[in-house]
Amino acid sequence: EDFQPYFEVAPKVARKVQSGEFDRGILCCGTGMGMAIVANKFKGIYAAVVEGSYAAKMAKVINNANVLTMGGWKLAPQEAIDMLDRWLNASFTEGFPEDRQKFLSDAFGKLKEIEEENFR
C-alpha cells in the first residue's frame, strides 16, 4: 500500500476545488472525519462527512457541500457508490418549495459571510 495521511491528501483536493479546476471533490479515509476537518480549513470548501445515501444527497441539497468525505472502514463498496451517485446527481435546494429555497440560499450566504470574517 502507498499510504498517504489525510492531512496531505485533503489539501490537494481542496485546492483543486478552491481554484475552480474541479466543481466538487471526494475524499475517503478511515472515518472521513479527518479529511473533512482538513478540507474545511480552506476558504470556499464546504466538506461534509456522510455515512448514508440520504445524508449524501442532503449534503448537497441543503448545505451545498462541494466536497464529500466518507469512511472506508465502515462502508461496503456498493454503499459508497450509492452515496456518490446521490450526491453527484443532487443540486442545491432541489425539491424544496420556493420559500424554503430562499431560506437555504440566504443561509448559504450567511455561511459565506462567516467565512469572510474568519478566513483572512
Image (spheres, grey):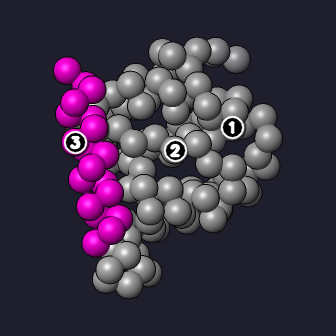
What's under tag 1, amino acid-wise? Gly
Query: Label 2 neighbourhood size at 10 Å, few (<14), some (14-19), many (20+)?
Result: many
96 sits to left or right of 58 = left
In this view, the mark in front (2 or 1): 2
Quarter of the image containing the C terminus? top left
Residue at 33 percent of width and 74 percent of height:
101
44 sits to left or right of 90 = left
Residue 1 is situated, as x and y percent measured from the top left of the image, at: 70, 17
Lower sequence index among marks 3 and 2: 2
Residue 37 is situated, as x and y percent measured from the top left of the image, at: 51, 27
Dividing the picture into quadrants, the one containing residue 112 is top left
Residue 71 image label = 1
57 sits to left or right of 98 = right
Residue 50 image label = none
Taking the view exactly as shown, the residue that stands out farthest to the bottom is 97
Cα gap from disc 2 to disc 1, whole angstroms: 12 Å
Residue 52 is situated, as x and y percent measured from the top left of the image, at: 69, 56
Q: Secondary structure at mark 2?
A: strand
Q: Secondary structure at mark 1?
A: strand
Labelled pair 3, 2 in contact (Cβ < 8 Å): no
The answer to whether residue 61 shows anywhere in this view is: yes
Q: Where 86 sits versus 111, above or below?
A: below
Q: Is residue 89 magenta?
A: no
Dividing the picture into quadrants, the one containing residue 102 is bottom left
Residue occupied by mark 2: 48
The magenta segment? 102-120
Q: Is residue 116 magenta?
A: yes
Residue at 61 percent of width and 31 percent of height:
33
- Residue closest to the eye, 58 or 104: 104
Query: Label 3 neighbourhood size at 10 Å, few (<14), some (14-19), many (20+)?
Result: few
Residue occupied by mark 3: 113
What's under tag 2, amino acid-wise? Ala
